[in-house]
Structures are given as C-alpha cells and as structure tokens.
Image (spheres, rainbow, N blue to C red):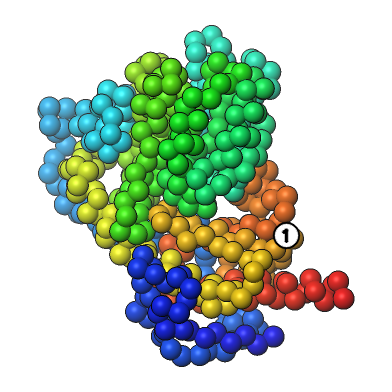
Amino acid sequence: MRINITRLPEGNLGGILDRDWPVPPFIDKTTTMTTTYEELRAQRLSIDMTRGKPAADQLDLSQALIDDVAAAGYLSRDGIDCRNYGHLLGLPEARELGGQLLGLPADQVVAGGNSSLELMHDAIVFAMLHGVVPGEAWCRAGEVAFLCPVPGYDRHFAICEALGIRMIAVPMNDDGPDMDRVESLVAADPAIKGIWCVPLYSNPTGAIYSPQVVRRLAQMTTAASDFRLFWDDAYRFHHLTEERYASPAILAECARAGHPDRALIFASTSKVTLAGAGMALFASSRRNVDWWQRCASVRTIGPDKLNQLRHVRYLRDRATLERLMDRHRAILQPKFAALDASLHALLGDLAEVSWTRPKGGYFVSLFTPDGYAKRTVELAAEAGVVLTPAGAAFPYGDDPRDRHLRIAPSCPSAAQIEQAGAVIALSLRRALDEGVRRRA
Ligand SMILES: Cc1ncc(COP(=O)(O)O)c(C=O)c1O
C-alpha cells in the first residue's frame, strides 16, 4: 500500500498544530511525500522509543553539576561535611529546596537517594513488612491489593507484581481515574491498601487530575483504615506548553478531609538535572515522615549529601528550576510536535485511531482499534523502531483490548521522530490491512 503524506499549511490541520504546537522548522509544510511501509523498512532505521529518557542535549543543560559545582567544596551552608555519614532525612538546605519545589514545609520533606522509584519501592516494602501504622504489617493482613489506573506506569505495576500485590485496573480518564469505580472498590474491599497516582501529565496518557478528582481521592471512605495514595509527582515541572499546570496540593486536601496521613508524595529531579544522578524527594505528614525515618534508618546511614549539595547550589530555587525547565521544553516540544504531525498526516483519516497531545510529561498514548496494538509493535520493530511492548501500561502486561501503544519521543532527534512516527503509523495501517484480509 502506498500512502500519500500531504503536509498542509499551518492552520489547515484541524487545530492539531495550534498555538501550543508550532510546526517544527524541519517540517516542510507544503510538500507531498509518498512512502510505504516497505520503503521505510528498507531504510534499516534504528530508533529506540521504549523509555522516556532525556536526550543528551537535555543532560548537557546540567553539565555544570559535574564541572563547576563540585569545585565549590563539600561543606554545607551550616558547615556539615557532606563527605561523611549522617543526616538520614537529607541535607537541611536540600529539604528546604524540596519544600519550596513541592510547596511544603521543609520538615515534611525528605531528600533521599537518586531515584523516586526507589523511594516508592521502599515505601511499599516498609508498609508490607512493618505496616504504615506500627504493628500492622500489610503482609500479615492476608491479601494486599492496589488500584492501578490504566493505562499507567509500567514500573509501578512491576513493583506490585514483584511484591505479590494484587493489581486491580481502573480506567483512567482525561481528568484522572474513574472515581465512581475507585470509590466503590475502596469502600468495599479492606485488602485495597493503595492506589497509584501520577497527578500531572500522567505517564503515559498525559492526564491532568481535576480538582474534583483530587478532592474525591482525599475524601473517599476506604474499608482499609491504613489506605495510602501513592502520589508520584514525577512531571510536576515538565510542561510542554506555555501554560504551567500546577500539581494539586494533595496533603492539604487530605488534611482538610480528615485524612492527614493518606498521601505519600514522591518526586525527583531525574528529568530536571541528571537521570540516574538526580535528587529524589519523599513528602508527607510529619507522622509519616517519622515513620519513614524509623524504617529508613535500618536501611541506610544517610543519603549522598554531596549530590544534594551540588543540586542545591545548581538549582538554587524554584524560579531557577523553572527557567531550566523552559530550556528542556524548547528541546522536547518540537519532538512531540514532529510525532503529532507524522501521526496526523498518516492516520488522521482513521476515525477509530486516536492519540494524545499531552500538555506535559514524556509520553504519547496511541489508541488503535481493538486487537491491533501488539501487531503494530511487531511491525514497527521489523522496520527498526522499537516501542515499549504493547500491554506494558497495564497490570501484568495485559491490555485486555490490545489497543494501547506508549510512545516516548524524548530521546531520538526530531528528524528521527518524524520517521518513527511514519513507521508507527504505517505499521498500524499494515496491521489493519492484514486484519481486513484475514476476515475476507
Ligand atoms: C511516573 C514516573 N514516575 C517515576 C519515574 C522514575 O523516576 P526516578 O528517576 O526519580 O526514579 C518515571 C520515569 O519515567 C515516571 O514516568
């Protein structure tokens, strides 16, 4: 099958390339290109779109963390020798910076290791082994279950699977999880101890939780008295448009609702500074910070304070961090626009196919007609574009409708993303074609 890709002038794309999504300069807006799946496959592309990793030029933005900041020495503001053990909850100025970033008092913030996922894993292990309330270990209560809004973050689900926690999928809407379903499940089943939440620019759909959803999560009646919101604020500063959406103030909302200990917040600078060498944050009520301290003190004598010190010196304050994030946006946004333009040009005529145009975060979700996601991923891989396995965004890797693809456009160049978008689109068209032929 030969597909004509007609690139229309800006303004004729049904709003796809609107003010928030300017056409990237490398896209020729007037030419018509024709290509086929076979032609693209013959190009022997090698493009990895499996994970939401920052690109090298994004990491370069924080090179000063490595080159300059360390030269300023190892003594903290208060004269703490950051080369030595101690300060389990983090360097005071790192907790203050974390508090400023999360809009919380510093004593409700812990500056932990290099990865928020690690802190989430720890929190669940602590809860399983010791309980979130002393003496009430989750693992002794029999079965433990978690609600998993889908599509969701595969590594959240991997933690549950590894620890034997039963996962219950609930639909994710544009404004957060389906709250009617969430409320009825948590009210009825005391085994449900938690829910995964990525409140802003959710991975992978870009959903932004509405104030109503947040209020209902804070207020809902749960059969488990030790129920927790696992509030993964991974994309708090990762805007793709000029509008800076704000993460909801979940601790205040929970406190107002009479559940001050319900939310456990996690965040990091992985996609602000260096992924893998960033600074991770845990925040909650003071009671939960004490709980964290009790549990974590068995696990470590203290975090990497040298890393915290250089982050404080480099990031300084929220305004400086936001300026840095503007520079990330300048790199990332054209890549999202390139993917969107490719998908629109090649799939825009198919009513049963849709994809997200996120306002922030690192991912695009593509929805195929039921039953075509796995085959599309296979065909894309044959043509040199590796995607996250179909189903990965669902508990146990099982998308019951086999229709969701997660696309991570951050790491390849914008020109590669345009090609990858074409490969994905033509792979889907070919899969659909095969389906039609199979039925005929
Ligand atoms: C929702 C979400 N949470 C957490 C992480 C990982 O964060 P960290 O690098 O701090 O472990 C990611 C990375 O893609 C993510 O998408």
Determine which residue is flagged by label 1: 370
Task: Determine whether the residue tagged by mark 1 lies in a helix, strand or loop.
Answer: loop
Q: Locate residue 195: give its quadrant.
A: top right
- Give 283 or 59, whichever is nearer the viewer: 283
Report whether 424 appears left or right of 215: right
Query: Does residue 323 show up?
Result: yes
Q: Residue 282: percent from the left, percent from the top?
A: 37, 31
Q: How many residues crowd around disc 1 within 10 Å: few (fewer than 14), some, or many (20 or more)?
A: some
Q: Residue at x 41, y 35 (%)?
A: 266
Report whether 119 appears left or right of 80: right
Q: Locate residue 436: give its quadrant.
A: bottom right
- Give 340 or 82, whichever is nearer the viewer: 340
Q: Give the residue type that dot 1 points to.
A: Asp
Q: Quadrant location of the N terminus?
A: bottom right
Q: Residue at x 43, y 62 (%)?
A: 410
Number of numbered tags placed on the structure image: 1
Q: Residue at x 49, y 49 (%)?
A: 207
Report whether 242 appears left or right of 370: left
Can you say whether 23 is above or below 218 in the image?
A: below
